[in-house]
Amino acid sequence: MRHRSARGRIPVLATTVLATTGLATTVLATTGLVTTVPAAASPARTRGSLSVAQLAGQRVIYSYTGLNPPASLLSLIEHGEAAGVIFSGDNIVSKPQIAAVIRRLEAADAYPGNPVRAPLLLMTDQEGGEVRRLPGPPYLSEKQIGESADPGAAASTAATRGGSSLRSVGLNVNLAPVLDVYRTPGDFDDQDQRSYSMNSRVVAALGADFISAQQRAGVAATAKHFPGLGAATKSQDTDVRAVTLHVPLARLRSVDEFPYRVAIAAGVKLVMVSWAVYPAVGSHRPAGLSGNVIQGELRGRLGFRGVTITDTLEAGALRRFGSYQHRAWLAAGAGMDLILCADGNPAEGQDAQRGMETGYRNGTLPRAASQAAVARIDALRASLAG
């Protein structure tokens, strides 16, 4: 979106950068091994088995327009057919107002007929700088953090204060930080100061500092946009049009994917996959529709075991892939866990739900993989309780 855990190894060279930016306690500098021990999460409790519609709905993030959620969305939540809600600036005028909305959504989630007993995923884009939906911190953009006198402290402070602000109104997921490594001044990421640096190791270190501090504050972090939009030019906006990034595989892995290796080691809970096409990985589909990217690069090569989330399903980059139902079916089949429906109409989410439900019924979406996706989402939701 433009405006709107595990163990891993990193090269010894990166440990020096990490140690200077707040991650010294998680780095064994003599071996280059970065380890974290994430808190154990109990699966979400369910009352009996989920219906096919509920199994599909538990993978959908819904949205709405205006200041009050519509009855249709509340009903979906009450009946276990929603994983969560994303909030845009259109939904928020003040902290008390959005806090009251979230209490209504939580009450719907607690409805006796809901078989899933776990917190909703309540998310927004609170990156910092110009990209903030909720009034308040973080005030600095990623670029301002990267250029500050003490970048590691600035990243941690931004995440701690931003996380506390989000938690104060009931939000529990932030679609941040951006881990793109921008290439030239004024390009897609840099024009809005959404990248920490042109140096992948700096991006990795500051991203990990942000992730660790924000998750300590009780808000799940989302690293985005895998495998990286840093090479995108100013006009290459996947929200608007199809984008192909001809980055050689060696460079894609050593530069663009490197911050994700460090983020995974820091325990990041979600990764958002981009809608750009990366021919170097052997795919001509957008990354979020590509098993080569999701299963090969992110889960296979980097070992990510958390929750994957698409970028917004209505993006212009997906125009050639037809209806929302078909896009959601393709994304789920490629290995995406959560489908993000952010056009402001719950009907988009219901279309995504129907697309997956059809796939479950006709066998084109394997049940074992679908249940594994829902299990990862359940574990994430359970980890955010309290």
Image: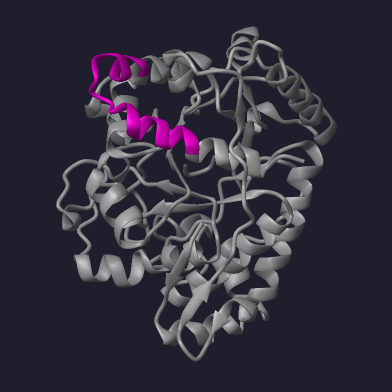
Give the farthest residue toward the front.
Answer: 48
Q: What secondary structure is the magenta-colored segment mainly?
A: helix
Image: magenta residue range: 357-375
Q: How many marks?
A: 0
In the image, residue 319 lies at what x, y percent? 27, 28
In the image, residue 318 lies at what x, y percent? 29, 32
14 in relation to 220, above or below: below
Q: Residue 56 sits in which quadrant?
A: top left
Q: In the shown orientation, is residue 62 left or right of residue 292?
A: right
Residue in front for this viewpoint, 256 or 12: 12
In the image, residue 154 lies at what x, y percent? 69, 70
In the image, residue 15 lies at what x, y percent? 50, 83
350 drawn magenta = no
Quadrant, the C terminus: top right
Q: In the shown orientation, is residue 65 left or right of residue 339?
A: right
Give the farthest residue toward the right.
Answer: 96
Residue in front for this viewpoint, 256 or 37: 37
Seen at 52% across and 88% down, the residue is 29
Q: Is residue 137 visible?
A: no
Q: In the shown orientation, is residue 52 left or right of residue 84?
A: left
Q: Residue 120 sits in which quadrant?
A: top right
Seen at 80% across and 31% down, the residue is 99
Give the colour scheme of this rendering. one colour
